[in-house]
Amino acid sequence: MLIRTHNLTKIYPGRFSVPDKPAVVDACIDIAEGETVGLVGESGSGKTTIGHMLTGLIKPSSGEISYCGDPVTLPLRGELRRKLQIIFQHPEISFNPRLPLIKSIEEPYHFYRKADGVQALYDEMGQFGIYPEHLNRLPAELSGGELQRASIMRVLAVRPSLVVLDEVTSMLDSISQAQVLQILKDYQKQHQVSYLFITHHEALCKVFCDKVYRIHEGCIVGLVGSTSQGFNL
């Protein structure tokens, strides 16, 4: 199993007369290599908190995360920092607004894939819908779909094992949404990356994911059926 959580819990301490707030309670999730797992729930249900814990952005209050059978300790270091990645709902937060797109894309690529050379990065751009005419634009000069595809490229170019997709299509129109999901599926077929697809959109979750967990008020309350075998855009 690539990722397994056991009784993963996050409780935010209260102050003064405000009680502690449990955001996630005893979450148990399995994600296999090359699998797309959905996490569906309403706003405030704790799904994003789980994604942040899996990628080291938030430290759990208790419980365990294992990667390929080994316990994950925080902060993430070395190869594990590269292998566990997240793509956010708002892609603009991943880019420096003052830098052209190419500078933001090259930075993690140079850090993690030094041996490949920058030409390999240029050779891969087309599969993400990013082309030379986009590279010298500032983030504000790109459409929402273009910027989200660039953020996906920025993360996937470092060859992660798991990517948390935190509402990555919720800000996009239907055409851009379909393009993004197809890019993610095509890349998964090539590289066997695993996804945790976080969303409030149950119908979309069912067709994109291999299995789907439902979360309510911080608790995993069951598995939802999925039909991803027929996914095709």
Image: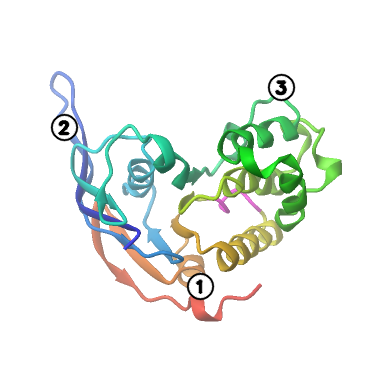
**Residue at label 3?**
98
26 sits left or right of 146 in the view: left
- Residue 75 in magenta stretch: no
What is the CA distance from the residue labelled 2 to the residue labelled 1? 37 Å
Work out whether mark 3 precedes mark 1 in sequence or the reverse, and give the earlier one.
3
Give the x, y percent position of residue 106: 68, 35
Which quadrant is the C terminus positioned in? bottom right
What is the CA distance from the residue labelled 2 to the residue labelled 3? 40 Å
- Region in magenta: 168-172
**Residue at label 1?**
207
Q: Amino acid at mark 3?
A: Arg
Give the x, y percent position of residue 213: 33, 64
Tell me the residue at 81%/48% (across/down).
131
Q: Amino acid at mark 2?
A: Asp
**Residue at label 2?**
20
Which quadrant is the N terminus positioned in? bottom left
